[in-house]
Each structure stands twice: as structure tokens, then as C-alpha cells.
Amino acid sequence: MQQKNYKLFVPGDLNGFFALMFDNLTVLSFLAGILIFVFQYPAEIVFGKMFPGTAFGVLVGDLLYSYLAIRLANKTGKPNVTAMPLGLDTPSTIGIALTVLGPAFLYLKNKYNVQDAAMMTWYIGMSTMVMIGITKFIFSFIGHKIQKLLPQAGLLGSLAGIGLALIGFMPIAEIFGMPIVGVISLGIILYTLIARIQLPGKIPPVLFAVVIGTILYYIIAPLGFVGTSFEMPKLELHFGLPIPTFNFINGFVESLNYLPIAFPFALLTIAGAINVTESANVAGDDYKVKEIMWVDALATTISGLSGGVAQTTPYIGHPAYKAMGSRIGYTIITGLFVGLGGIFGYASFIVELIPRAVLAPILVFVALDIMAMAFHVVKPKYSMAVAFAYFPTVARLLEIKLTNPEYVPTNVFETLTKTIGKHIPEISVIVALGNGFILTAMLWAAFIANLIDRKFIHSCFYLLLLALLSFFGIIHSALPNGNMYLPWTLPAYLQVIPYQFSLAYIALSILFFLLSFSKQAKVPYKEEEAV
């Protein structure tokens, strides 16, 4: 054991705290906004039941990562050890709100009253988190093998698609829905985080963007210059204790229908944990990947047991936090601030106080970073595979809008999805492509990446896997709610989707297999041949 020669709190921890804290509050803001304003989910359940448990997972994870950093500092004697940042996973929080919680609530409203439907949706969210946490723990033992089995283009391409359609596009709509305030805040983020120009006095850029945007909003909003009606936020705190319970069992059966969505989100954070641990090691902090993954799995599971509906993840910016002078104290402060904020209600108060158009630019930066990273990290020859993985998430975004009764009445939607003979209506195609979108994106990119590498057997394997998953609705489900099924039990007009989609993938795998014997198929891929 080395002598303690580090400081628990240093000035740079303040920069790290503001960056990590606002990241988490931004994700909470969009979780609330999507559920409350897009799906008309009861606000009191979001703030009083979902927020406490969700924030509690951040508290547990950040304190445990702080402990790992203290232990590493004691072991190595290094005074500049930086704790691994942990927070709410942006892609899955927004994705699960849009593709699990929201659609589940709309579906359950047809069976129960609004309050009961909201409570059952909450149970589904809890159960989903518990399953994700357990999945992350199990896969922590074989994470490296999964990462090697699935091409990098599949993992990063699916994540980049989420960045484009769910994390980036929706906040852009929020920004231009309140143009003056939103664009000013976006401009500060572009100036500081994209162009990398420091503000005078080294003011934390995220804090500056949020403060300036919020002040501007409350100056011009009462005058009618924000593009929407102005209403002062309610000055109330939503108190809630995140007490672990077995309430998640109530939503277990229903949550299985959304497993094809939830499981890939867990897989993405598993791969992400491996990558961020490696980046921390390169930066000089030698963390063990299994410990990083175990803590994340524990935090997500405890969050779900306590009422949380968003998974935690180690953030990819460890070297950035180290560069800004953050050490160990920033994760302690962030964990306590966010966790206690969920319990005592000031986190929800801040979320209601700060306009989403002010917080949205932070997510736009995250989306741009994710998309750029996919093309920077993946070899150029796989760029087409990465780009092809975008399409299922775009389809999912369209599906979210089309299946919302406020945009398309239910009777009109059902009429538009009726097949005539063997013809598949365009809306049915969009729905099918959007269901299971993450897994679809991973597998699409995987079979193309293997095709580029001339690994035809591997490519055919992924195509046959796509066919199998399509047949049972695990991906490309013909049902608007994305449920799995036995295809012969579907209404006759929907059966055409699983049968034709599966046959299409099988036919393509046969074609690739036959073409693999040609002389041209033996020629290695050349960059200059790419069009």
C-alpha cells in the first residue's frame, strides 16, 4: 500500500461536476419531456416515482467509482488519478422512453384507466432495468468475446443511428421550436465544445450555455418572443424515497415484449464499458474492466429495484475529465447532487425550471460526438456499413410519430396498414423496419462488414439470423407494439411481413453463398474501388 499523497477534492473537480451533473439533468429532462409532453404520461409519477430511483442509481454508481479511484490512488501512489465518470446512458434513456415506456403507456391506456396504465408502465420500466442490470453482470464475463464476435461497425453503427435520429434530431426540433433561446445556447456549445475555443476566464462552457439560455428565456418569454406560450414553473418539490421493492415483478411479463429493444441497449453499454476502460488505461488510470462493468451492472439493477427507468453507464469522456483537471471529488459531488436531487425533488424542480431548448444543445453535441466517433474509430472501408445501420433508427422515429394517435388517428392507421394481396403498405414497412431497430442495425452492419472482408460464410450467417429473428417478430415485428409472435397466429393481412422478410434474407444469403465461388469474390477489397 502506497502512502496517501492525493487530494480528494481539487479545483478541477468543479469543471467536471458541472459537465457531469448537467449531462445527467439533461437526460432526466428529456426523459420527463418525452413521457409527459409526447405521450401525456402523468407528471407526478415521472417526478415522484421514476426520478428518485433513476437518480439513486447515479448516486450508487458514482460513489462506487469514486471508491475505485481512491483505491487505485492508494495502490499506485499517483496524485492525479481521475475517477471514472458515471451517469444516465443517453441513447438508451431516450430510446427506452420513446420505444418502450411511451408505446407501452399508449397500449395500456386501451386496457386500463390512465392512472393504472401509468403505474403498469412504471413497473415495466423497473423490470426492464432489472433485466438490463442482470444482463450486464452476466455479460461482464464475456464482454470481450461479444465485442470480437460482432463487428465494430455493427456496434458503433447502431449507436450512431440512435445519435442521428433519437438523440440529435429530436433536440434539434426542440431548439428551433424556441429559436432565439435555443439557437443562442446551441451556438455557445458549438463555439466551445465543437470549435474548442475557451471562454474568457475559462468559464465552464456547459454551465455558461445553460445559465445564459435560461436567463434569456425568462427575459423574453413573458414578452412572447420564444415561439410558444409562457408559463412560470410550479415552485414545488417532488419528494420520493427510492426504497428497493419487488414491484418490478408486476411488469415482468409485459416487459418481455420489449426485450428485443432492451437487450441491445444493454449490449451497447457493455461494449461501451470495455472501450471507456481501455481509454482510461491509455490516459494513465489502470482500471479493471470487470470491476467497471460490475459497478455499472449493480447501479442499474439497484436503480430498477428502487423505481428507476433509465440505465447507468460509465461515460466515454474519462480522458476529457482528466484533461480539465478533475480527479475524484467530481464524481462524489455529482453522485450526491443528482441522487439527493431525485430524493428531495430539487432535480425535478431544476428540470422544470430550465427550458428543454436550453438543455437540448448538450444532447446535440453528444449526438454529433457519437456519430463522428463511429466514422473515426471504424476503418474507412466499413463506413458504408456504419451508414447503412442508420436506417432502422430513422424508421423507428417515423414509427413513433405514425403510431401516436394525436398525429394519426388509430382507425386511420389501421386502414393504412391493411395489406392487399401480397402488397405491403409503406406504413407497415416503416413499422416493421422500426421494430427491433437496434438489433436490426447491428446485424445489417455486421453482414455488410463481413461482405467487405470477403467473409461470405459469416455474412450469410448474419443474414440467416436476420431471417430467423424476422420470422418470429424479434425484429421487424408486424405488430405496431413490436411484440413477438408465432407468424401463423397473426391476422392474414399481417402474415405477409414475417414470411416475405424472412424469405428475402434467406434468398440473399443463398445468393451471396453462390457468388462466393466466383473468381471476383476472391479479390480483396481495395479502398480506391469504393465509389
Image: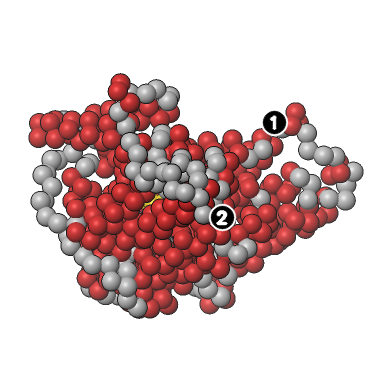
- Residue on which disc 2 sits: 288
Q: Percent from the top left, x then y, of residue 241?
A: 23, 67
- The reply to whether residue 447 is visible in this rendering is yes
Residue 137 in picture, x, y percent from top left: 52, 66
Q: Secondary structure at mark 2?
A: loop
Q: Residue 326's image quarter? A: top left
Q: Is residue 15 visible?
A: no
Distance from label 2 to label 1 (Cα)? 42 Å
Of circles 2 and 1, which is in front?
2
411 w.r.t. 34: above or below: below
Residue at figure coordinates x 53%, y 73% from the top left:
485
Q: Which residue is mark 1?
A: 531
The residue tagged with tag 1: helix, strand or loop? loop
Q: Are marks 2 and 1 in contact (CB under 8 Å)?
A: no
Identify the residue at image location x=66%, y=63%. 465
The image position of residue 125, as x and y in percent, is: 37, 66
Q: Nearer the viewer, residue 503 or 153?
A: 153
Residue in the picture at 41% in, 53% down:
66
